[in-house]
Amino acid sequence: MAFWNWFLPHKDTHKKAHLISWEGLLIYILLFIFLQVGFSIISYTKPGVLGIDSDIDQKTIIELSNIERQKMGLAPVSENAALDKAAELKAQNMFSENYWAHFAPSGKSPWDFILGSGYKFTYAGENLAKNFYKSDDVVAAWMASPTHRDNLLNPKYKDIGIAVVEGVLNGQKTTLVVQMFGTSQALAADPSVQIQGKQIVVPAQDLTNKQALTLSVTQIKPETKLLIDPYLVSKWGGFSVIVLIATLLVADFWILRRRGVFRFSSHHIAHMALLSLAAGSLFVINPGAIL
């Protein structure tokens, strides 16, 4: 098998280059699998080397959240120091117990952190985000989700607390954003917390003898400034493959036309449609996630 047959149509049979055939597709899939396995190995052996380098600001999150509330004719929420502390405690606990969820593996609930910060509430809510690059991307993601949007636009809330904390989660440098809402009044008989569209009444036993929590949770910090963004590596690797395939398709068209054997078929349309779809998907996706 000639080396150039991987890149150019076969001289004798005019069969298309291997890299734009099913053989090539298998190679791309294997390369992607090896890349993801490599990321997993690095995350395990060198925690903090991989990760997302974010530029998210606490005050900006609050400002953007209030802009969205005011668009709907709602009163802005005011930053509350106790809710800031609750959000910080929740973020630190996620790093400490290495989880990404509203409820900790140890059983800690969102209201444990809110009540533990000294904030007594009638209504409260929590939104989470991780691995976004910018503040406006975080708020846009929350607004695009019906349950998070309803939480952010809840007219019952008066206060807000935000924490933006970096650490290592599942072996990768991660930026967590915790958004806490609340209405601070005399503790109601049945205070509730809104989580992922569900209004959860706080159990009576959780309202008594709640000890104050302190910001003393140990978390793993990234140990090195060397940071490889696995999302960007995968994204630009994908774009590189798309450019390679598109280039080979153009070369295939040009060479076979010069040989006088080119026939435009539905296979070429399928190739171009698939490439366009893949490029569009790579362009719009981002590594961020919300809960």
Image: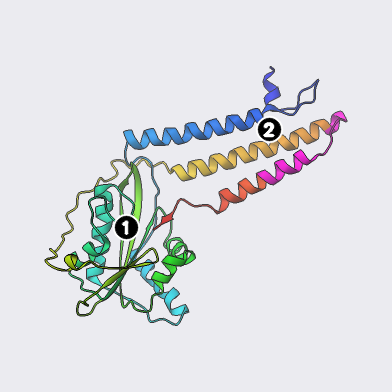
In this picture, is 247 found above or below 129? above
Can residue 117 be seen? Answer: no
For the residue pair 84 and 3, the one nearer the viewer reads as 84
Q: Quadrant of the N terminus?
A: top right
Q: Position of residue 199 (x, y in %)?
A: 34, 69
In this picture, is 157 found above or below 290? below
Q: Quadrant of residue 69?
A: bottom left
Q: Position of residue 249 (x, y in %)?
A: 73, 36
How far apart marks 1 and 2 lie (CA) works out to 45 Å
Is 275 on the left-hand or right-hand side of 121? right
Residue 270 located within the stretch drawn in magenta: yes
- Residue placed under numbered mark 2 in the picture: 20
**Majority secondary structure of magenta residues:** helix
- Residue placed under numbered mark 1 in the picture: 102
Q: Position of residue 107 (x, y in %)?
A: 23, 54
Residue lying at 47% horizontally and 34% vertically, measured from the top left = 35
- In this rendering, which labeled residue sits more in front, label 1 or label 2? 1
SS assignment at label 1:
loop
Q: Which residues are magenta?
A: 257-274
Spot the residue most to the right: 260
Q: Position of residue 265 (x, y in %)?
A: 81, 39
Q: Quadrant of residue 13?
A: top right
Colour scheme: rainbow
In this picture, is 9 found above or below 102? above
In this picture, is 143 found above or below 17? below
SS assignment at label 2:
helix
For the residue pair 217 and 212, the one nearer the viewer reads as 212
Residue 168: give its label: none
Is 107 on the left-hand or right-hand side of 282? left
